[in-house]
Image (tube, rainbow, N blue to C red):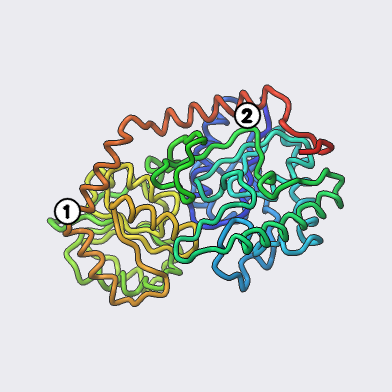
Amino acid sequence: MARIAFAWEFGGEFGHAISCAMLARSLEAKGHTIAFMFRELHQLASLPGCDHYDVFQAPVSPRAGENMPAPASMADILLGCGYDDARALTGLAAGWRALFQRWQADLVVADYAPTALLAARLANLPRVTFGNGFSIPPRLSPLPPFRYDAPIDPRTLAAADARALASVNAALANLGGAPLATLAQLFEADEHFLCTFPEIDQYGARPTSAYWGPRFSIDTGVEVRWPYGDGKRVIVYVRDSLPQLDALIEALAASRYRVAAFIPGLTPERRERLRSARRVVAEHPMRLKPLLESCDLFVSHGGNVAPGALMAGVPQLLFPTQYEQYLTAVRMEQVGSGLWLRQGGSGAEVAPALARVLNEPRFAAAARAFARRYAAFSPAEQQRRIVLRIEQVLAKPPILSPSSTP
């Protein structure tokens, strides 16, 4: 049996940890040994069945995201997360490689972890990517733009690509690896588990790519029942850092909606304002499947859990707080299944947006139509196929060696 390291480097929210934990359990059931090498470890305390795995703090840039303007492509995100400094990137890649080698990993599952992919290349380890469309960019050179809100000068894309590639190749040279010809080669892997559907892929449909369907975890977590009453049912899955959180709490408290909420880090004062006979506030991630079966609206940031609500045919109100979530929100709006509010928007927009999605039938109709389109999709079958493919990768030599020229 193999030793499989899950690497998570960029991004936030519970979706990364929850999705990796689900796949880890399926692999563990086949006899494999699991380690989590995560950028955030505190989330594991809320996930049952993870306390026996080996856990390591992932190497991450201490300046990640500082003063980073709105990115136009994945190259800009890399530059904002340590790839603007070849020496810093060398240290990060060396740290990842040391983790893999000391833990004696046989395979790396990279969830939004480009530097882990770089280190796995250096260590000649089999590797797979596991994520949504945003974290697995198309293999184009330069890496393509994902901006919707402004035209992007091709020269800007090429310049960002060249800067990031120069740092990558300097790090590879420092650590004994062969250079890459393009930045896109950084994302090479033995398999890409592109866990989304074309309509909600942040880069748009990729005709030549195999879609595995969204990864979402709606059947794990604590049991929560809808409060009694006759109001419409609303699930809230946001973070306490949401700028419009107070406006959201006030709008829900002033309504007759029945609410099931999970807001990690919620202060006692806010918790008391939200909690009532009509509103339950969970302290741990909720088991969403039974709630979604009779839900009228799902409120979130637009992370990995949003496709789960869409697959259940539930319309959504989204509060994206970073670019990946913004792109998901735009795709949801294009599908017609919901609305989104910008991060710097007024709190006065919240209550009308809630009422609009709940009361205009077109949003629920679009969500149900999407769910019917993919009614045959099975998360259990997806997990079975991913595990099977990982075991096939383990049975073969890695696609690249550290001395090979791509």
Q: Nearer the viewer, mark 1 or mark 2?
A: 1
Residue 216 placement: quadrant: top left
> In the image, what residue occupies the spot 29% across and 42% down?
370
Q: Residues within 10 Å of mark 2 (few under 14, many from 20)?
A: some
Dot 1 or dot 2, earlier in sequence: 2
User: Circles 1 and 2: CB distance less than 8 Å?
Assistant: no
Considering only vertical position in the picture, is 270 above or below 153?
A: below
Residue 193 placement: quadrant: top right
Please state, as top left, top right, bottom left or bottom right, where the C terminus lies in the image: top right
Residue labelled with disc 2: 32
Could one spot residue 83 in this view of the protein? yes
Could one spot residue 235 in this view of the protein? no
Considering only vertical position in the picture, is 111 above or below 261?
A: above
Please state, as top left, top right, bottom left or bottom right, where the N terminus lies in the image: top right
In the foreground, 320 or 277: 320
Identify the disc placed on residue 361.
1
> In the image, what residue occupies the spot 51% across and 39% down?
194
What kind of residue is marked 2? His
User: Percent position (x, y) of residue 196?
Assistant: 45, 42
Q: Residues within 10 Å of mark 1 (few under 14, many from 20)?
A: few
User: Percent position (x, y) of residue 62?
Assistant: 69, 66
Identify the residue at the far left of this view. 230
User: Percent position (x, y) of residue 44?
Assistant: 54, 50
Which type of secondary structure does the marked residue at label 1 adopt?
Answer: helix
> In the image, what residue occupies the spot 70% across and 62% down?
82
User: Percent position (x, y) of residue 25?
Assistant: 53, 34
